[in-house]
Each structure stands twice: as structure tokens, then as C-alpha cells.
């Protein structure tokens, strides 16, 4: 390895490809045998981590301020001039490792992944992959610039969310319609972006010699343990098991609210007319109380979160120009996660931070693994880490345990979380089934009107109980507002599968919380060393799609709701 390879990504961020390339070339020409393959892999890992972390830090900067032109320029420059060349060089190193026939300890699954990536890699696709990432940034920019005037003040659409919990129904409706009007104003812009995204994705699949983008994306996501047909089985299980329960929950809400029909602006308000939960008044309070909860789950996990607080690895407030949503990403050289949220003082913000905290703990727990390739854990299990943490931390939501609420409010928040968990599965099925349709019918999906029609059809199948009459345009464009469809295609079924696993982890915790937390942490520490079903098993769960497993966890959730409601 040439001298002076940077030890931090912050240094590499100022480098050109001409400065980076010699390090790849040295690894490509260096020989190794069973006695020193570990050294070669560690050197390759460090270089790969530097490239990955550089990309993530540049991308994070664009999400923290979508109007920062310099940040956008730096990120796009990286995607144009370094990312494609680095991917091509990575391919050569993968081929070198595979041709050696060596299998270092703990490297069986990474080798399986490597073989798949080497097989479908095409250098001609590198510019398209860069273009796809830039289009995702364009989507973030469109959404990040959506603001409205509310009571004389310019606010983001996220900042309107507390109004949806207002007990004044007319006020909720006014806010919801104002937000919807602003979103519809970008309809054509998102439709144009969609056409470009589909064209890029069609090209990626064609260049790889695959019949559809779904086939391409399945390999790109390294989905070895389930198929598109398994996803469709999961949709059918949700339709059979969850949709009737969700319909009952919607009807219970309608009756509690005393309204003739449940409208979209009736879904977040407390159905019993209680004031909205307002868990915190400042970001510092959100951090402090969440930290206390994590300490109660596990002192080690609590300390991980304190590290993030001390090292400025949290960006939790909402502001104009900030990208939508929330995420946790990884800086693998620094062995640190970074959490991004849009918090406005509602209970969902607490749930989001607990969720992203689970992702962050995954980074900490697996950071001991020696090779970068071992850190690539399946996304389906990554979401067990996050959704599982929401549930493992739930017993500590009350102020008596360092959390946010009275005992009554804590019970109420858990009921809301469990109900939303049940209601999530049908929505997840809409999003996932929509994407299967898109990439099974790419020519039809290139016409946004067909996408609108399909979304409405799936909505009618899975989302029974909400009255959208007079709001047909708002309903059919719902696919515009699910960022995963645009920026992370097919990355959504993971949430549904992971919730199924996380409820099983929670079921274990109801019997023995310390043992469940211990199994959870052990599974996180495995990183990507073992298969997806093995990770679920290590956490105390079963990886499944069937109606019986789903029915078991939904019954547990319903019973717990009844218990908490007294």
C-alpha cells in the first residue's frame, strides 16, 4: 500500500481520482496467499471505507441544506469523477479475491455477495448509477422546498404535522388541504423526474442483460433469501390477516370521533378528544430523555447515544431547506453513525429517534468486524434493529423511567404505536405492490396517469376505512409522496418484514427483557457474517411471509392494546 493513505474521510474529501487511483492499483498488483490475505483484505477494507464515508458525508451535507449549492456541487463532482472510477476499481479487486479461491474466516457470506456483484457488474452502468443518485437528490430538493403560509408564517409541510393532531376538525382539514395543494403544485415536476428515473433504471437492467429493473435491483440489494413471489405472498397474507383488523381500528376511530366518515385529516388526532401528546419543547430535551431511555434498555446502548451527542452526530430539528424524512447513515472509518430527523415536537419524533437509534446501535455493535464487506448487513435485518429498538425502549417512555410522559400518557403512546404498526402493514403492501407493478410494466408505468390509476387500485385493495371522496387527485398521487419509490426503489418491504421480526423480539422481551436485549445486541454484532434467516434467528425471531406467523403477532398486538387501554 503506498504511503500516506488518509486515516479519515475528511482528508480524502479534498482528493482527486488521480490521487486515489494508485492505492487501488497497488492492491490490484499485490500478491497474497493464505498467510497474508487478511492483511490485503484489511487494506482493501480501509480504502473502501474511505470512499464510502466520503460519499456519505458529501450526501449528508446536501440533505442538511438542500439549498447549499456548494454542497450539491461537491457531491455531484464526487458522483461524476470519483464514484464511477472507484466502482470500476472495486470490481477488479472483487475479481482478484474471487479468483484466489481463498475463503478467510467469517467471509463466506461476503464472498457470496461479492460473486453476485461481480456477475452483474457492468462498467457501462457506472454513469447511470451516478445519474440515478443525482436524480434522487433532485427529488429531495423538490420536497425540501415545499413550504406554505400558516397563520402568517412560512412553514415546512413537516411543521404542519402538529396541526393534524388538533382537536378542531376544521383546523385539521384546513392544514391538510393546504399541504395537499402545495404538494400537487409539484405534480408535473415529479412526473418529469419519474420519467427520467425509469429511463435510467431501464438502462441499468438492459446493460446488465437482465429482463427487468426488478431483477437488477434484486441482485443489487443482495436478496438471496426471498423472491418477488414471496413478497406477493406477504401482500396476500396482509390482505387476509391485517386488512380486516385495520378496518376495525379505523371504524373504532370513526366512532370515537363521532363522525360520519373518517377523512385523511382524522388519522392523527386523539380519538377521545385528549390534547395531543407534546413530549418535548426543545431538541435538547428530546436528546436528554431519549438518552435516559436508551440507558434503561442497556447502559452500553445509552453510552453509544451519548457519544453521538458529544460528537455532533445528530441533526434532529426541522427547518426550511432540509431534506424530508429521517435516516441513520454510517461513517465506517470513524466507526460512527449519523442520525438525521425532522422533529417538530410530536410523539412521532420520539418514535423516529428510537428507530434511528436502533440503526445507530447496529453500526456501533458491528464496528469491531475487521472487513468492510462484513459490515454490509441485510436491509431487512437492519430494520429489525430499528423497529426492535422502538419496542424494547417502550417500557421506559414514562417520566418515572427517564422518559417523556405520565404513566397514562405512556400507555396511550404505546397503544398509538401498536395501532400504527398494524395500520402500517397494509400501507407497506400498497407501496411494495406498486413497485412490483411498475417494473413488471415499465412501458405503462412511464405514463404517470397509469401510475395514478394503479396506486388508486391498490389503495382500494388494502386501505379500507378512510373516505377520500372529493380528494381523488390527492389520493392517486400518493406515490409522489413516498420518497422510497423515487430514491430507494424496492426498499420498503424491509420495514414490513422487519416489523414482523421485531414484534417477535418484543414478544420475547415481554417474557424476559434482559435476555431479549442480549439476543438483540448479539444479532447486531454479527453484521453481515451470516445469512438473513440466521440473523433473525440470532435475535430470537423467524424470517417469514406466511399468514399464520403474521396472525400470531397481530393477535399479540391486539391483546396488548386491549390491556393498555384497560
Image (spheres, grey):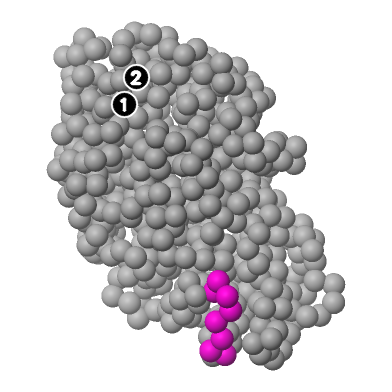
* The N terminus: image quadrant: bottom right
Instruction: Report the quarter where the C terminus lies.
Output: top left
Which residue occupies 53% across, 85% down?
98
Q: Residue at x 52, y 28 (%)?
A: 350
User: Above or below — where is 519 with respect to 210?
Assistant: above
Tell me the number on the disc at residue 410: none
The residue shown at (31%, 16%) is 565
- Residue 383 in the image: x percent, y percent? 44, 48
Reply yes or no: does residue 111 show up in magenta.
Answer: no
Main SS of residues in magenta? loop
Q: Left or right: where does residue 324 sit relative to residue 12? A: left
Residue 121 position within the rendered picture, expressed as x and y whole percent measured from the top left: 47, 79
The reply, left or right, for residue 340 in relation to residue 480 is: right
The quarter of the picture where residue 421 lies is top left
Circle 1 sits in a helix, a strand or a loop, which is it? helix
Q: Are marks 2 and 1 in contact (CB under 8 Å)?
A: yes
| Residue range corresponding to the magenta coloring | 100-107
Q: Depth check: 51 or 472 in front?
A: 51
The residue to which callout 1 is attached is 560
Q: Is residue 105 magenta?
A: yes
Can residue 257 be seen by looking at this rendering? yes
Give the secondary structure at mark 2.
helix
Report the residue marked by disc 2.
Answer: 564
Tally of numbered tags:
2
Of the pair 519 and 415, the residue shown nearer to us? 519
Q: Is residue 290 visible in this depiction of the protein? A: no
Q: Residue 537 appears at what percent x and percent y?
A: 40, 55
Q: Between 505 and 136, which is closer to the camera in this rendering? A: 505
Q: Please indicate whether residue 243 sits to the left or right of residue 379 in the image.
A: left
Amino acid at each position: 500500500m503506498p504511503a500516506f493513505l488518509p486515516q479519515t474521510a475528511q482528508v480524502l474529501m479534498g482528493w482527486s481520482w488521480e490521487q486515489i487511483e494508485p492505492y487501488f492499483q497497488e492492491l490490484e498488483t499485490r500478491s497474497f496467499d493464505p498467510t497474508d490475505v487478511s492483511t490485503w483484505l484489511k487494506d482493501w477494507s480501509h480504502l473502501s471505507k474511505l470512499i464510502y464515508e466520503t460519499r456519505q458525508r458529501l450526501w449528508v451535507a446536501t440533505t442538511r441544506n438542500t439549498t447549499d449549492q456548494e454542497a450539491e456541487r461537491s457531491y455531484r463532482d464526487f458522483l461524476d469523477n470519483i464514484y464511477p472510477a472507484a466502482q470500476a476499481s472495486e470490481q477488479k479487486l472483487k475479481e482478484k479475491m474471487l479468483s484466489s479461491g481463498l475463503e478467510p474466516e467469517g467471509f463466506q457470506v461476503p464472498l457470496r455477495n461479492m460473486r453476485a456483484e461481480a456477475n452483474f457488474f457492468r462498467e457501462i452502468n457506472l454513469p447511470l448509477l451516478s445519474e440515478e443518485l443525482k436524480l434522487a437528490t433532485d427529488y429531495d430538493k423538490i420536497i425540501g422546498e415545499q413550504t406554505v403560509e400558516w397563520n402568517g408564517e412560512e412553514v415546512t409541510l413537516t411543521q404542519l404535522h402538529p396541526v393534524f393532531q388538533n382537536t378542531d376538525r376544521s383546523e385539521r382539514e384546513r392544514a391538510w388541504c393546504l399541504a395537499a395543494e402545495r404538494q400537487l403544485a409539484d405534480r408535473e415536476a415529479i412526473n418529469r423526474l419519474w420519467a427520467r428515473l425509469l429511463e435510467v433504471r431501464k438502462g441499468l437492467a438492459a446493460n446488465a442483460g437482465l429482463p427487468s429493473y426488478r431483477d437488477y435491483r434484486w441482485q443489487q440489494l443482495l436478496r438471496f433469501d426471498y423472491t418477488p413471489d414471496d413478497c406477493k405472498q406477504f401482500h396476500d397474507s396482509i390482505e387476509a390477516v391485517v386488512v380486516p383488523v385495520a378496518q376495525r381500528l379505523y371504524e373504532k376511530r370513526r366512532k370515537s370521533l363521532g363522525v360520519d366518515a373518517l377523512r385523511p385529516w382524522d388519522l392523527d388526532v386523539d380519538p377521545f378528544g385528549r390534547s395531543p401528546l407534546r413530549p418535548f419543547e426543545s431538541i435538547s430535551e428530546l436528546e436528554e430523555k431519549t438518552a435516559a431511555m436508551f440507558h434503561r434498555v442497556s447502559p452500553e446502548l445509552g453510552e453509544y447515544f451519548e457519544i453521538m451527542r458529544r460528537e455532533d452526530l445528530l441533526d434532529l430539528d426541522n427547518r426550511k431547506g432540509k431534506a424530508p424524512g429521517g435516516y441513520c447513515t454510517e461513517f465506517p472509518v470513524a466507526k460512527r453513525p449519523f442520525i438525521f430527523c425532522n422533529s417538530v415536537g410530536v410523539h412521532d419524533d420520539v418514535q423516529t429517534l428510537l428507530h434511528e437509534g436502533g440503526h445507530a446501535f447496529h453500526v456501533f455493535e458491528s464496528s469491531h468486524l475487521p472487513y468492510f464487506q462484513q459490515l454490509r448487513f441485510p436491509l431487512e435485518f437492519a430494520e429489525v434493529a430499528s423497529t426492535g429498538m422502538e419496542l424494547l425502549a417502550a417500557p421506559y417512555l414514562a417520566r418515572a423511567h427517564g422518559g417523556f410522559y405520565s404513566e397514562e400518557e405512556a400507555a396511550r403512546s404505546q397503544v398509538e404505536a401498536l395501532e400504527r404498526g398494524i395500520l402500517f402493514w397494509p400501507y407497506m403492501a400498497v407501496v411494495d405492490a406498486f413497485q412490483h407493478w411498475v417494473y413488471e410494466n415499465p412501458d405503462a408505468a412511464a405514463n404517470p396517469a397509469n401510475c395514478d390509476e394503479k396506486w388508486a387500485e391498490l389503495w382500494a385493495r388494502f386501505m379500507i376505512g378512510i373516505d377520500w371522496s372529493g380528494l381523488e387527485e390527492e389520493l392517486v398521487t400518493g406515490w409522489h409522496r413516498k420518497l422510497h419509490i423515487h430514491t430507494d426503489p424496492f426498499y420498503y418491504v424491509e420495514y414490513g418484514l422487519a416489523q414482523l421480526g421485531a414484534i417477535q423480539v418484543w414478544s420475547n422481551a415481554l417474557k424476559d427483557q434482559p435476555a431479549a436485549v442480549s439476543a438483540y445486541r448479539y444479532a447486531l454484532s454479527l453484521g453481515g457474517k451470516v445469512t438473513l434467516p440466521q440473523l433473525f434467528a440470532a435475535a430470537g425471531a423467524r424470517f417469514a411471509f406466511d399468514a399464520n406467523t403474521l396472525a400470531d403477532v397481530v393477535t399479540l398486538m391486539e391483546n396488548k392494546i386491549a390491556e393498555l387501554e384497560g
